[in-house]
Amino acid sequence: MSAYKVFLKDFPDRCEKILQRIEKNIRYGDLTVTGLLMVASSAIIIPYERLSPVPEKSLAHPSGDADKYAEAAKQFKELLDSKFLESRLYSATTTEKWRLARPQSVKGNPDEWNCSFKEISKDKTTKGVLYIMRNSLAHGNIFTKPERGEIQEIIFVSVELKRDNEGKPMPGELKHYNCISVTPYLFKQFLDKWFLCIKQLEIYPYVIDDCKEVA
């Protein structure tokens, strides 16, 4: 097996290849959403954690990638600061939309949350969308809505805590939940664009091992 030369760039590339293998193998036809979530759990969280700006008085990621690849970190911040609906990660369709909701409770199935999902506003930042997805994937807060035996919506849930006067979260003090609902098709489009964005970051050197990949 070839080795990781630049983990930040090589690992997401391998995640993309795994997803492509799942898609091409008809034996996994009914596991498409499972494959999407498996790949996303690593392919989104790892670059996000390694390149995101470090909050004041917080420790930098142990990899030091944000300093090591300063230009890439700058480009990533520009992506985070962009409006999601105008970003390179967004795919527009006439029938399927990214939607948001803020339920006070997520007990039971999504139809019992007593909230309405609305289309993402034009002012929503990419950082806001990725933050919800990152928290949801990291903590396993994922729900689905099936119809006729197939998953029609993937719902990512992030816990929003109340904050003190300094803006710090207050453990145990729930404010509400932030939820994103997206169809499997749109989420796949998002992942494809995510992989492309990571590839285009200025992360050097990127050297591929000469050994053949066997896994």
Image (cartoon, rainbow, N blue to C red):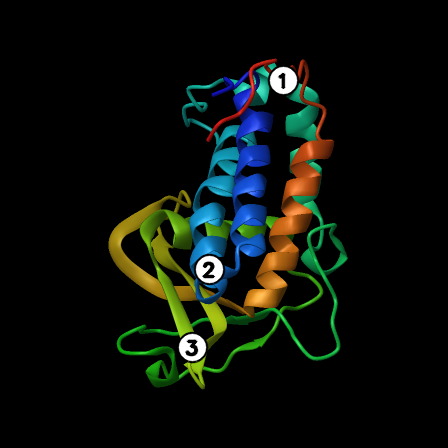
| N-terminal label among 2 and 3 | 2
The three-letter code of the residue at mark 1 reads: Ile
Locate residue 107, reporting x and y percent. 26, 75
Circle 2 or circle 3, nearest the eye: 2
Query: Which is more toward the observer, 24 or 54?
Result: 24
> Which residue lies under the disc numbered 2?
27
Q: Is residue 63 left or right of residue 198?
A: left
On screen, residue 152 above or below 26: below
On screen, residue 176 above or below 4: below
* Residue at the image point whose x is 49% and y is 64% from the top: 29
Locate residue 13, reporting x and y percent. 59, 34
Regarding mark 2 in the picture, which secondary structure is present there? Answer: helix
Measured in 3D between alpha carbons, the distance from the residue under mark 2 to the one under mark 1, in whole angstroms, is 30 Å
Regarding mark 1 in the picture, which secondary structure is present there? Answer: loop
Circle 3 or circle 1, nearest the eye: 1
| N-terminal label among 3 and 1 | 3
Locate residue 212, reporting x and y percent. 56, 20
Regarding mark 3 in the picture, which secondary structure is present there? Answer: strand
Measured in 3D between alpha carbons, the distance from the residue under mark 3 to the one under mark 1, in whole angstroms, is 41 Å
Q: Are marks 2 and 1 in contact (CB under 8 Å)?
A: no
